[in-house]
Image (cartoon, rainbow, N blue to C red):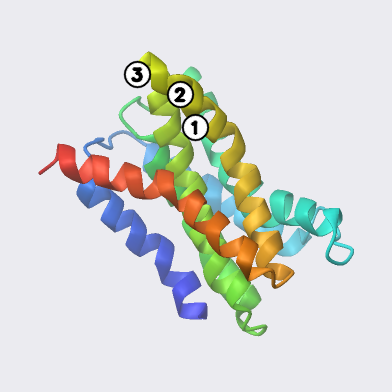
Amino acid sequence: MSLFCLLWLPLFYLFWRSVSSAGESGYGGVWALLLGSAAAIFQFFYGAFIKPGGFGFSRWLSGCVDLVVVPVLLPLLVYLLLAVFRVVSGTVDFTGFALLWIIPMGALRAVNWGAQGDPILLVLVPLLWTAVAVGLPFLGGIILRGPWPARIPAGLAGLALPFLAATVYWAFFRQEHRLGVPLLALGMVPLVASCVKMAWNNR
């Protein structure tokens, strides 16, 4: 399971580059790896920002802030700032930038969580990172360029996806698999749709 946490993100990034039509130029990838490494090292030594207190809301909030959502939203927000100040070119896609950013975090987490052998941390969390990193830019693309009838549902789905990912983590932590499994499947829909769309466009 530690090997999955270590290799899943690099392998998925390679898969994404193979099906994605977005080019990558300039220093976007370098910035993603450098800033992602700095963020991963900081959190590795600092620890959790929110101390979970059992199985309730604090556990859900800790999963949202420290584990699942914020680590993936941060590179998306940073990319926006870098693009605004023209530090990176506009050809680097949001998804590729976010995936590169979280690769160092996955490697450090594999070391940190390896002794626990917890499949929720070593398998589920990297899957949720990927779902958010791919799903949010995909839904954002629909909001900006999709047909008008699809924009409102895509906007609502984009707002719900991060909280859905945190809820999936919380449900599996509580061993409520009847809730966690369908929510996980629902959260993976934008990821699968994005990959299918990319592969179809590049067929």
Residue at image location 86% in from the left, 60% down from the top: 51
Q: In the current view of this chain or complex, which residue is farthest to the left?
A: 203
Circle 3 crowding by C-alpha within 10 Å: few under 14, some 14–19, many from 20: few
Circle 1 crowding by C-alpha within 10 Å: few under 14, some 14–19, many from 20: many
Q: Position of residue 112 (x, y in %)?
A: 65, 74
Q: Tell me the CA gap for discs 3 and 2.
A: 19 Å
Residue type pointed to by label 1: Tyr
Circle 2 crowding by C-alpha within 10 Å: few under 14, some 14–19, many from 20: some
Residue on which disc 3 sits? 145
Q: Which mark is residue 5?
A: none
Residue on which disc 1 sits? 79
Image position of 151 with respect to 185: above or below: above
Residue on which disc 2 sits? 83
Q: Tell me the CA gap for discs 3 and 1.
A: 19 Å
Is 42 left, or right, of 8 in this rendering?
right
Eye-nearest disc, 3 or 1: 3
Residue at image location 76% in from the left, 55% down from the top: 60
